[in-house]
Amino acid sequence: MILDLDKFLRKEWPFWDELEALLRLEENQPDRRPSLEEARRFHYLYQRVSSDLVKLQTFAGETETVAFLERIVARAYRSLHSENREKLPFRPWGWLTRTFPATFRRHGLAFALSMGTFWLGAGFGAAALGLNYELKGDFIPPQFSHLNEKPSKRVAREEERGFDAFEGRNTFSAQLMTHNTKVTIMTMVTGFLWGIFTVILLFYNGIIIGVVMFDYITDGQGVFLTAWLLPHGSFELPAIFIGGQAGLVVARTMFGWGTNIRLHQRFALIRSDLLTLIGGAALLLIWAGVVESFLSQYHSPAFYPWKIGLGAVQLVALILYLSFCGRRPRRSPATLV
Amino acid sequence: MLGATTSLEVQTPEGVSFRLPIASPFSRCLAMAIDFAVILALTVLLFQILSILGNMLTHIPVIGRVVSDLSSGLLIILQFLIGIGYGIACEWLLRGQTVGKRMMKLRVIDERGLTLRFSQVAIRNLFRLLDILPSTFYLLGGISCFLTKRCQRLGDIAAGTLVVREVPVRPPALESLAQSRSNSFSRHPHLEARLRQNTSPTEARIALDALIRRDELAAEPRLTVFSRLAGHFREIVSFPEEDTIGLSDEQYVRNVVDSLFRRAGG
């Protein structure tokens, strides 16, 4: 059977036109809520045009009209079957007090593994330096070449220097924020390669910290080191661990352990969590960048207790926030009706 | 592998299927180059504006140095935000398109044909940092595009998206097919009925497509195509000689199409 295309087009064209007009209206005003009558009419038109498409595909085989109808049906299908377009901006307070800490806790094991890998690297770096101090230059990357000099010499020089509040502090702060955020995103996305590079990045960064810590502590500069690193490190290191956590969540998704669903479905389940984790890490890094630029680099011994105190308070506050914030109170059995 | 699938076929719950043409890596590369140029232009513009502001305020005592430092810090942050946020903002606000994609008539869509969610847009753009590796050669993303059936880079796989071509489609002007000439076959309704009975939809489609695309063919191939088609339809049904004599092959096919598509309903 071959369709009478001319008659068919004349009869059905007004319906295609009407559906297209409704689609245009919806696409131009995404926030508009159609009335019940309008929604019913839309659904009727979608079904009618879909049926026309099937008829044309089966009986006429006229490619251009089929392509034309396919496009209308695709748009109508997208409109009918998609979830409502999310509204932006989202609710920052709810995200900060509930979503982020809850997501962090949901992937707690990945965070523990991320932190463990980092400190394993730190232990390795410290042990390697303890066995052979000559290796220090090999472990410290070129951009941190100032760490190659003897800690006590650097401390003496830094403590003599005055504090110039305006000398490139904003630029330095911006560089730290953007660089660290980029590294954190990188730690997450490399999880796609089955987590190998995420683990390497964490371990390598751990080695650098381990080497620096061992070097300063064995040189008797533990207090300087704590006052230098703790104010910003109390936020910066957890942010890097969270980046690693997100990377390991991606890696687990790639492996698909314990599930029998397909890769794209597994990714659909973690997408929002990844964004939440990386968004939280970025926030921590912004604050860490400000502190590192404006406070951490000011090395006056009189300020050490304040700096260490601030760092400790920040760390405890962060631990409490991530551990307890946004927890739903457990209902007693009596209230479970 | 590339070319294994050139279109995304979506089967709706209503049992209807439709296809969306998948963009080639080449057109995606061009779109990316345009986007890169836009990002570069935005960055240069920003740099110029902040430099002018910085220079104007540097001479003011006390706050001059602070403002100058602040503007260079701001430039670093804005550069970073443009680099990361350009794709996210454009694809979210322009429903799957950036400036480059719009110019190349491409669009990012959900791999099930549904509306893009913000998390998909953000993830596919964040994973670009992985796709561009090593350095900025786009090797990982390029290899992934060539190896996956739907030409997806790693960011597309993670986000559940793919890039399709936006082909403007217009329905054919059927009035032009029959032209003004009368169809001599209409004098033989029983033969027309036999023609419709013995012609498959695929054969009918080929004849109709040949007429729609006649102007795209050069003279010689056009003659060959219509000669073969006319020969094929002559074998299906033989119309009396007095109605076919003097008819060109193309007019013969026009009459066949007219009989098949216009008169089927009577």
Image: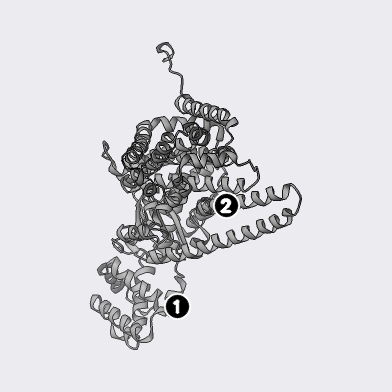
Image side of residue B234 versus residue A218, left or right: left
Q: Earlier in the sequence, mark 2 or mark 1?
A: 2
Q: Residue furthest right?
A: B61
Residue at 40% from the left image edge and 75% from the top image edge: B213
Q: Which residue is mark 1?
A: B179
Query: How far apart are labels 2 and 1 at the CA level?
Result: 65 Å
Out of A288 and B231, give the one closest to the viewer: A288
- Mark 1: amino acid: Gln
Out of B57 and A96, give the one closest to the viewer: B57
Mark 1 crowd level (few <14, some 14–19, many ≥20, 10 Å Cα): few
Q: Position of residue A42 (x, y in %)?
A: 49, 47
Q: Position of residue B161 (x, y in %)?
A: 40, 51
Checking the image for residue A92, the label placed there is none
Establish if A249 lies above or below B66.
above
Q: Position of residue A277 (x, y in %)?
A: 45, 38
Q: Quadrant of residue A112?
A: top left
Q: Is residue A186 visible?
A: yes
Question: What secondary structure is found at the residue carrying circle 1?
Answer: loop
Out of B194 and A127, give the one closest to the viewer: A127
Q: Quadrant of the N terminus of chain A?
A: bottom left
Residue at 58% from the left image edge and 28% from the top image edge: A306
Q: Residue furthest bottom?
A: B246
Chain under numbered label 2: B
